[in-house]
Every structure is written in C-alpha cells, then in structure tokens.
Image (spheres, helix red, strand yellow):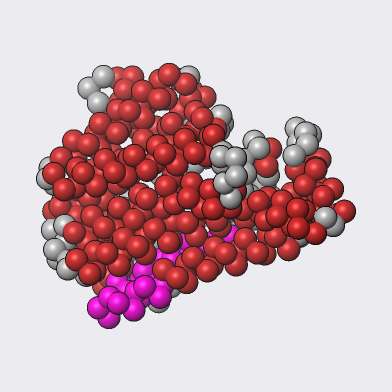
Amino acid sequence: MNPSSSFPAGLAADSTPPAGIPEGGLWDGIDPDLARRTLDRLAIVEERLRAAAANADSLADQTSRHLVEAGGKRLRPVLALLAAEFGEADREQVVDVAVTVELTHLASLYHDDVMDSAPVRRGAPSAHEVWGNSVAILTGDLLFARASLTVAKLGPEAVRLQAETFERLCLGQLHETVGPRPGEDPGAHYLQVLADKTASLLATSARLGAMYAGCSQQVIDIVAEFGELVGIGFQLSDDVIDLAPADSATGKTPGTDLREGVVTMPVLLLRERVLGSGIPEDAALLAAIEGDLGDDEILADVVARLRDHPVAAEAKRLASDYAERAVRLLDGLPDVPARAALTSYARALVERAR
C-alpha cells in the first residue's frame, strides 16, 4: 500500500474523520499535515488488524474478525501514532505497536463481554451471544496470541512491557470482580481498577509508540504518564455517560451499569454522602439504586434522579481533573503539532460525556 493514498474507504484528506477516530474535538484545529499523516497510518493499521484477525480455520476466522470489522474508536492506535510524532514516526515498528495494542484491546473485549454478560458490542451482538461463552473466550485468547506474535517482532523489551500490561489488565478485572477488601477505601480501590483495566493499555500504547520512534527517555516517560491519566479520566467519563439521556449521541443505553450492579463513581460518591450526611433524599436514592432495577420505568426514574444529583457533576469534574493533569504534563514535551493534538485527545475523551 502507498501510505500517501491509504485513507479509509470514502475518506478524503479534508473530510470529516471516520467513526474510528476519537470524537469531541480531537480534529478541531489539529495541524492538517499531522491529521493526514495520522489518518494515512491509521488506515495501514486497519489493514494489518484485518490481516492479523484472519485465520485459515473458517470458524476462528469468523469469530476473530467479528469485533475488528465492527469498528471502534481506535483510541490506542491513535495515541501510539501521536506519541511517535515526537520521534521518527514513519518507522515500521510504530505500526507494529499500533496493531499490537489494538489486538490486545480487542482480545480483552471478548473476555469482558462474557464476564459482564453484555448483549451488544459496537452495535453488533457480542460474540458470546452469537457463538457462546466458550467460543468467545477462546477467540479472545486467539487474538492475544496474534498480539504476542506481532509484539515479538519488536524485541524482548516490548514483550516484557506487553506482559506487564496484560498482568495489569487481569488484576484490574480480578479486583473489580472481587471488590474492595475489608477496610480498603472503596474510592481508591475503584480508581486503581480503572488504572489497571483501562489506563494501563493506553499508557503502554503511548510508551511503545514513543519508544519505537526513537524518542528520548524523558519523552517516553511523559507520554506514558499522560496515557495513564487520560485512561482514568476516560473511564470516569464513561460512568457519567451511563446516565446520559436516551436520545444523546453517546450510543450507550442509559442505566446499563446501574442495572448490572456495576459500581461507578457517581454511586461511590453518593454512598460517601449518605454515610457523611444522612440526608433522607440521598439515602432513598441509594436504596433505589441498590434495589431491583429490572423494571424499565423504575430504572429510568433512578437514572434521571442520579443524573440530576450533584454527584454526577462531581464525577464529571473528577474526569476533567484527570484530563487536565495529563495536559499539564505535555509542557515537558517539544512544541510540535503532536503536543496540541494530545491536548485535544485528552479533553475529547472526557468531554464526550457532556
């Protein structure tokens, strides 16, 4: 493929970015040359993802391509590509990095959907809904294997970082499943879960992108910490999205987390208020949240009440705080167009909840 002409199907260099690009302002005001380079390389990543998901076995081929072809934001490849802009971004290894981190993310989604009993992923039925839990889990394992094959080409340091990230992904899921230990602060426990389950792979995406573009250690450390903070902010904003009205552009069904009993930051903040103040209205809302939300009308009422409660705004502010902490880190990077792009990236991920 000629990189200069590798835009996704139907995309011109000056057109609106496709759905696979982060929304909410990332492309507003971004340097046009940087936007074109990133879109070019992202198109190559897309081709490589499809090739990596392909399998000679017809069943494995069908199941592995299921989520790749469903699309997605491609947040991790985009971050890797932008981090590489502080070095030699056109190195082939940078594309390998972008493919590796997205394959790892896709693999984890197969497992997450089984554990969460999620019926839909990216507008399509979840793999376990189509083929059953065992096939979905094994497909996730297959994609992890493909990610390992890709990262192995980068050498032992990349393999080590990939393994450490995979460990954090598993620990985050484990700690979320078990919950905080007796005496452990629930809020701190929750933030650590977010750091491990989501932020770890974003941090690794940025770290490996900068590493294999030949960046200095200072740049590598900054973009990795940036990815960690942005990842936590991103997941906190997702908690608020769960409360968004049904006609919003978020694409998420309101109250999904509440109905599934998933603990989110607004609920944790509400529990703190109930313990601290004992306001009857807060206690009544918490009791409703922890009650039976199987009825759609009851769920809609609880969602609306929580959305209008001060804890929802507090969770938004917390998400924004993490994004702004990430942005302040960028002052230590060279003043190149990618720095402004990373600022837009950080803010876009949290502002999507508004």
Q: Is residue 226 left or right of residue 118?
A: left
Could you tell me which quadrant the C terminus lies in? bottom right
Give the magenta part as a residue range.
Answer: 327-354
| Extreme-front residue of the structure | 183
Relative to 38, is 2 on the left or the right?
A: left
Point out residue 119 in the picture as x, y percentages from the top left corner: 56, 31
Q: Nearer the viewer, residue 269 or 10?
A: 269
Figure check: 56 above or below 267: above
At x 33%, y 40%, the residue is: 166
Which residue is pictured at 80% across the width and 59% down the height? 277
Could you tell me what secondary structure mostly forms the magenta stretch?
Answer: helix
Which picture quadrant has residue 138? Answer: top left
Q: Is residue 125 visible?
A: no
Along the line of sight, the residue nearer the viewer: 181 or 322: 181
**Residue 344: within the magenta?**
yes
Picture coordinates of residue 27, whole percent (x, y):
40, 68
Question: Residue, x 19% and y 47% (percent of image)?
Answer: 158
